[in-house]
Amino acid sequence: MLICGASFAGLAVARELAGSGADVLLIDRYEIGERQTSACGIPTGWLEQLALQGSLRQTFGELVIHTPYTTARYALPWTFSTFDYRTLCELLADQGTFSFETAKVDGRSGHAVHTDRGDIRAGLIVDGLGWRRVLGAGENVQPPDALLSRGLEVHPGGTGGDMEIWIDRSYVPAGYGWSFPAGDEVRIGVGSFDPRFHVREPTVRLATDLSAESVRYQGNWIPHALRNATEDGVFFVGDSAGHCLPLTAEGIRTALYFGLALGRELSEVVGGRRSVPEALSRYSRFSASHERPFAWMLRCQRLVPRVAPRLLAGALRAMEARRFLDFAFGHYLEVAHPRFVAAGPRRTPVQVRVPA
Ligand SMILES: Cc1cc2nc3c(=O)[nH]c(=O)nc-3n(C[C@H](O)[C@H](O)[C@H](O)COP(=O)(O)OP(=O)(O)OC[C@H]3O[C@@H](n4cnc5c(N)ncnc54)[C@H](O)[C@@H]3O)c2cc1C
């Protein structure tokens, strides 16, 4: 089995295959954990359930939202944490059983994946390569026509106590800015729902406004619509399947969630309990069954930038009510709940490695 992409999605698939007897080759153009792909914020429950607390940097019980007319403080019914990317990837990789090679994937013909180190043939192929969907049947997904947002952030040294969001059109007409403290660094960035708007200048401006340096950039395109999770006999997971949530651009827990689901399907195939066509169809249906919350969040993503700023400020303040927050954030977590981790059949015990 070949898993392409060794970030959240690919590592989750490999993790769930441990003990299934699968012969797994995982490839990525970089070493595992080498290139951070996000601000690395996630509901803490996911770190706990996957025994990844060793990567935790900072935990927040509140979300602070700034607009030009108000600042709202939301007491969350569950906590959110930032983590260290490299450590998380290493801890997750330790839970899988696979061979790893660095190789850049260029495309695919049938069951042969073309890489800069030669072709690799495999009966089961997983694309966890991110938004570009490199192993798709047609042309690669290309901005600005595809349903993609864009995000860029800087990682200056520093500390902070709040997880903060800015919904402010002076930074970005449709989208938001953020500041996620993570121990001794802060991840400050801007995401635009419209791929035509550039995010570099507003990211630098937001960092300057926060008296932080614009150093250590990282950015990427972010899908904001579900795509077919299978195509031409290939399994897609994480950003390659559009599994990142619209509106919030939260794509880590969903990459883990769908990665575990896919790993469970593939384990059944390896164990001879399910055919490949069955697994393709079941996984595709499982992914598509989440269409409703994704579509609902996409509607909100399109609506928020159209609401007059004063009206938005009033609405955000009204939403500070405890009962509303419990309801809204409870539903939001349900889209990919950490209890899903324990719902699967683990075949090997998890070894928790806490870094020195
Ligand atoms: C600036 C920014 C901040 C974000 N912050 C958050 C956040 O705080 N919380 C959150 O939940 N989500 C966040 N996201 C979204 C999140 O990063 C993605 O949804 C998530 O990384 C998807 O995981 P993935 O494993 O599918 O893909 P990725 O994390 O993109 O991983 C793809 C992997 O494939 C490899 N790869 C790509 N192309 C090739 C190739 N051709 N050959 C070989 N290897 C290749 C890459 O090296 C990488 O390891 C953010 C996104 C951006 C851009």
Image: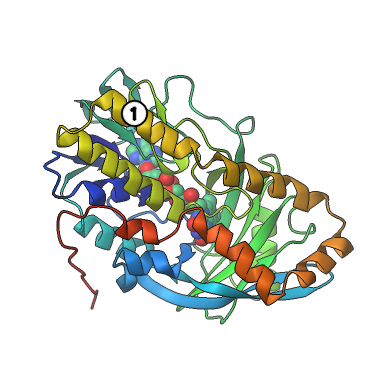
Q: Is residue 307 left or right of residue 346?
A: right
Residue 90 image point, x, y percent: 26, 60
Residue 257 image point, x, y percent: 39, 51
Circle 1 — which element? helix
> What residue did someone put label 1 on?
280
Tell me the residue at 31%/65% (across/down). 87
Looking at the image, which residue sits at the far left?
Answer: 21
Location of residue 296 with respect to 73 vertically, above or below: above
Answer whether residue 28 is visible to the viewer in this image: no
Location of residue 82 with respect to 338 vertically, above or below: below
In depth, the one of 104 and 163 nearer the eye is 163
Residue 155 image point, x, y percent: 51, 66
Q: What amino acid type should be assigned to the residue bearing mark 1?
A: Leu
Crowdedness near tag 1: few (<14), some (14–19) or many (≥20) residues, C-alpha within 10 Å: many
Q: Quadrant of residue 119?
A: top left
Residue 254 image point, x, y percent: 45, 51
Tell me the residue at 24%/74% (across/down). 355
In depth, the one of 157 and 320 nearer the eye is 320
Q: Is residue 170 left or right of residue 233?
A: right
Q: Quadrant of the N terminus?
A: top left
In depth, the one of 220 and 303 nearer the eye is 303
Q: Is residue 240 left or right of residue 219?
A: left
